[in-house]
Image (cartoon, rainbow, N blue to C red):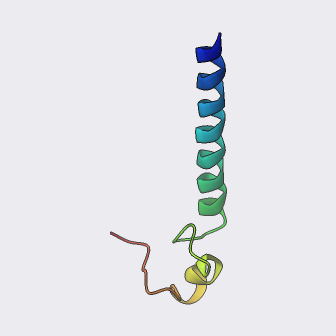
Amino acid sequence: MANLIVIIVLLLIVGAAAAYVVKAKKQGQKCIGCPYAKDCASKGCGCGNTGER
């Protein structure tokens, strides 16, 4: 039973992280997690990261 609870909690954490990334990408953010991410889409990334690899 304890293993089931751990698996459910891990799935919730992974699901929340995936939802955050999908939402950020739909908003046009290139570098997710960057404090200047909302500016990246319009005038280039302010942190020096282009968002590309």
Q: Residue at x 62, y 78 (%)?
A: 35
Residue at the farthest top position: 1
Q: Residue at x 44, y 87 (%)?
A: 48
Q: Residue at x 59, y 32 (%)?
A: 10
Q: Residue at x 44, y 73 (%)?
A: 51
The answer to which image quadrant residue 28 occupies is bottom right
Give residue 13's position: percent from left, percent from top.
Answer: 63, 40
Residue at the farthest front position: 2
Question: Which quadrant is home to the N terminus?
Answer: top right
The answer to which image quadrant residue 7 occupies is top right
The correct choice, above or below, for 41 with respect to 22 in the image is below
The correct choice, above or below, for 43 with respect to 38 in the image is below
Give residue 36's position: percent from left, percent from top.
Answer: 61, 82
Give residue 32's position: percent from left, percent from top.
Answer: 56, 67
Residue at the farthest left position: 53
The answer to which image quadrant residue 25 occupies is bottom right
Q: Nearer the viewer, residue 42 or 2?
A: 2
Q: Report the label total.
A: 0
Q: Nearer the viewer, residue 37 or 35?
A: 35
